[in-house]
């Protein structure tokens, strides 16, 4: 007869059950890899039937997976699962390699054309002279045409702090002068010794960038070629 007490044997059995049921470190490490975001294609599609779409978008209908793979092979195309959650799943005949390449190029072009609005800053004094004002206004006009926001800061010093209306009038004047290019996005407000206003552009950054590129291309097209320039120089020398 065993000398081990019954409660000790039960505790040992429970401990063994817990240790045997818990997954090992190696088991966790071997549980698959990263989840793929790419669609299933060809033999990876393991369903009895699919709703098939032709290469030009035509609806073929519900066919067996065997027939769908046969049609793809005959057309020298891939069978691509485009709607896995549908019942049955929707698959399309396409050149998957070409599709991936075109998708990557479109994504690259979208990232290239993506434009971010930048906040520029202009600082003025309440008693700015006319020449300096025109210079600062020119900067604001240039920023707005480029599709950027402009943060206008009026800096008060000494006794100027007791005359906030000077800052209000100056900011209102600037907003009126550039109203064709921008609008007051954040109205004038006092911030310590400064007064701040934000002007936003009417044009989006992408639109301004596209217009700039078009204007640059037009200017480039109007420039004479190297042969024409050399011909003109030759004619001048001959004359």
Image (cartoon, grey):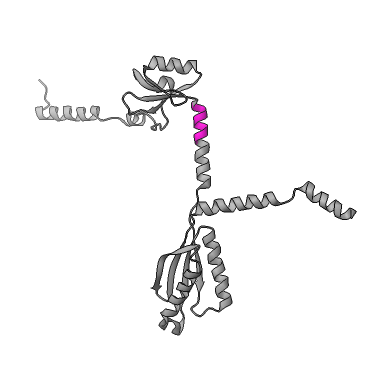
In the rendered image, the vertical position of residue 139 relative to residue 166, given as above or below: above
Segment tinted magenta in the rendering: 96-103
Foreground: 76 or 214? 214
Q: Looking at the image, which residue is at 44% across and 14% down?
A: 70
Q: Main secondary structure of the magenta part?
A: helix
Quadrant in the picture for residue 198: bottom left
Q: Looking at the image, which residue is at 48% across and 70% down?
A: 176
Q: Looking at the image, which residue is at 53% across and 45% down?
A: 112
Q: Looking at the image, which residue is at 40% across and 65% down?
A: 186
- Residue 189 is situated, as x and y percent measured from the top left of the image, at 39, 72
Foreground: 77 or 177? 177
Horizontal arrangement in the rendering, residue 24 relative to residue 161 (left or right): left
Q: Is residue 98 magenta?
A: yes
Horizontal arrangement in the rendering, residue 233 relative to residue 174 (left or right): right
In the rendered image, the vertical position of residue 106 relative to residue 157, given as above or below: above
Total numbered labels placed on residues in the image: 0
Horizontal arrangement in the rendering, residue 214 relative to residue 237 (left or right): left
């Amino acid at each position: 007869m065993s000398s081990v007490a019954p409660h000790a044997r039960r505790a040992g059995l429970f401990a063994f059950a817990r240790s045997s049921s818990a997954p090992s470190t190696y088991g966790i490490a071997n549980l698959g890899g990263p989840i793929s975001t790419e669609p299933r294609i060809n033999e990876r599609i393991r369903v009895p039937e699919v709703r098939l779409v032709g290469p030009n978008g035509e609806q073929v209908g519900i066919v067996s997976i065997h027939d769908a793979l046969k049609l793809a092979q005959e057309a020298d195309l891939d069978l691509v699962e485009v709607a896995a959650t549908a019942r049955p799943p929707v698959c399309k005949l396409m050149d998957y390699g070409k599709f991936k390449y075109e998708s990557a190029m479109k994504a690259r072009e979208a990232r290239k054309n993506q434009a971010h609005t930048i906040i520029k800053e202009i600082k003025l004094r309440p008693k700015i002279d006319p020449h300096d004002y025109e210079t600062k206004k020119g900067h604001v006009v240039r920023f707005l045409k480029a599709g950027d926001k402009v943060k206008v800061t009026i800096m008060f010093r000494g006794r100027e702090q007791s005359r906030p209306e000077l800052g209000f009038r100056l900011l209102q004047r600037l907003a009126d002068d550039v109203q064709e290019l921008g609008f007051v996005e954040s109205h004038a407000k006092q911030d310590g010794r400064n007064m701040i206003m934000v002007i936003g552009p009417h044009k989006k950054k992408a639109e301004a960038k596209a217009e700039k590129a078009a204007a640059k291309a037009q200017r480039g097209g109007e420039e004479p070629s190297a042969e024409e320039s050399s011909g003109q120089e030759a004619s001048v020398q001959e004359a």
